[in-house]
Every structure is written in structure tokens, then in C-alpha cells.
Amino acid sequence: MLNSLRSKTSCEEEAKFLQNRIQLVEKHLADLCDVFGQYARKTARVRDKGDEISKSVISYSAGETVNRSLSIGLDGFAASMSTLSDYGDARTRGLELKVVGEFSKYEDICKRAREEVRDIFAAREREMQRKKQLDRIREKNPRNRQQIMQAETEVAKATAELSKTVHTIEEKASTFEKQKLHDLKAILLDFIRIEMGYHARSLEVLTDAFSLVNGINEDSDLEDFQTTRGKMDLEFKKSLRLPETTHRNSPGARSVLLRSTQSLGAIFSSSHTKRFSKDRLNKSQDTLDSIKHSLSETEESDSETIESDDDAEEDESSMEMRNDPKKVH
């Protein structure tokens, strides 16, 4: 009886120990599966954002027509980000397959292990029932050797079955523990290899991207900007130049020119305000005022010249009349 109690205690303790181990592995590997799954989803989002950055930079580079070195640097940076996204895609797929996928398998493995441990408790329960039945037969019919021997045989079978079940579970528990250690080590090493490969290749790409972006020539791009702006200013000034005519000093030409300048002033004061800045508009207005002033001075000088010519003609006429009195009569 004492040996039976010891056997019962030892069997139950071993079953509980195995059960606790399985529950511990199941809990923590489920947590690892969840957290690595979140990590893989984060890397997928980083990959997608890298694609968005690449598209935005390419769009900017296509629209940049003044700063040539900046456009080249942006193209190189966009290509680097696209390459990083490709590496990120391989990284995400590797994490999902070799890390998250392997951890997720342990849900079924731990479930089967729990069922096998429950077989120990079921076999132990059958053995206890057979022993109780043997004790009842011995109490009721102590002289019935046939029933007692049959009950003892059933007890022996139940004990042998329990022993076999325990031995099988012990072997499976060892296999489970060995597989857990091997798989956990392999999964973590795969994770490290995936991350090392991604970051090593990313470092190479980012090194090239650094060289391309660092090669942007600020002085050259600023000179390009100044040149482009100078060409625009030159075209604007050409649009303000007056036409050269052979009858520039004639009153009709001056009146037409004055009306033209007034029309230009009206144009610049209304519609061209939307196209030019205030500084350029003020310069244009000053130019128009100077033109008007020069025209007015030209008119005044012409009128003075005409008057002087008329006075000279009158003086000549009076001199001729005095010198030739016959003309007077």
C-alpha cells in the first residue's frame, strides 16, 4: 500500500511538472509570436513608407529644372530609397516565414503535448479504479479466489498500462523539450541573420546615398538660379524698350509714342500686377515716368526751336524791306 501511495505521488508530481512546463512554453512562445508579428508588421510599414518617400523625391526631381546638381542628387537618393524598400520587403517576408511562422507552430505542438499529459492522469485513474474494485471483492468474498485473481489481473494490466503511458510521455516530454530548445535557438538565429543581412546591405546603400546627396553643389545650383533669373530680367527689360523710328522727333510720332507709353502704364497698373512683384512694377513705373518726362522735354525743346525759327524769319523779312524800299511800295 505504501509503495502504491509513493507510486501515485511520484506519477502525479511528474505529470504536473510536465504540464507546467508545457504551459510555460506555450505562454511565452505565444507572447514571442505576437511581439515578433508586431515587429514584422512595423517593418512592412517602414517598407511602404520608403516607397512613398522614393515617389515623392522622384516627383520633386522631375519638376526641378533649375538646380541641376540637386536634381541629380534627388534621383540618386530616390533610387537608394527604392532599393532599401526592396531589401525591406525581403526582410519582412523572411521574418513572417522563418520567425513568426515557426513560433505559431507551437500552438498546435503544445496542444498535443497537453493532451498526452492528460493521458497519464486517465491511465492513473483507471489503475485506481481497478485497485478499488479488487479491495471491494476481497472484503465481500475473501474466499472467492477466482474473482480475486481476475481483479488482480485487471489491476496488473492497469498498472502496466500506466507504466507504459508514463514511459511514453517521458520520452515525448524529452523530445518536446529537445525540439523546443532547437527550434527556439534556430528561430532567434534566423532573426539575427535576417536583420544582419538587411542592415549590412542597407549600410552599403545608405553610404552610396550619402555620397550622392553630399555631391550636391550648392554654389553651382545658386549660379544656375541667378543665370535663369537674369535671363528673365533681360526678357522683361526688352519688353519695355521703345521702337526706333526715323520720325522719332515728329509731333505725330511723339503723340503716338506718348499714347503707347500711357497704354503700357495702364497695362502694367492693371493686368501685369498679378504677374510681377511690387519691386519690378515700381521699377517699370519709374521707367515709364522717365519716358514721359523725356517726351515732354522734347516737345518743349521742339516748340522753342519752332518759335526761334519764326522769329528769325521775321527779322530777315524786316531787314530785306529796309534794304529794298521798292518792295515796300
Image: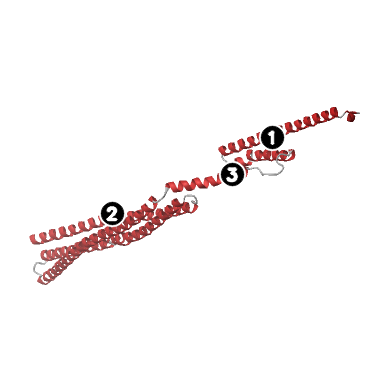
The residue tagged with tag 2: helix, strand or loop? Answer: helix
Task: Give above or below for 254 relative to 9.
Answer: above
Residue that badge 1 annotates: 298
Q: CA distance from mark 2 to mark 1?
A: 95 Å
| Residue 52 seen in render | no
Q: CA distance from mark 3 to mark 2?
A: 71 Å
Q: How many marks?
A: 3
Give the label, 3 or 2, closer to the camera: 3
Q: Position of residue 219 (x, y in %)?
A: 43, 46
Question: Label 3: few (<14), some or many (≥20) within 10 Å?
Answer: few
- 301 w.r.t. 215: above or below: above
Q: Position of residue 254 (x, y in %)?
A: 71, 38
Identify which amino acid the numbered label 1 is placed on: Thr
Q: Name the N-terminal-most of marks 3 and 2.
A: 2
Alpha carbon separation for disc pair 3 and 1: 26 Å
Q: Which mark is residue 7?
A: none
Q: Which quarter of the figure is the C terminus placed in?
A: top right
> Is 303 on the left-hand or right-hand side of 98?
right
Q: Which residue is mark 2?
A: 31
What percent of the width, then of the height, locates residue 205? 35, 56
Residue receiving disc 3: 236
Q: Amino acid at mark 2?
A: Asp
Q: Label 3 is placed on what type of residue? A: Phe
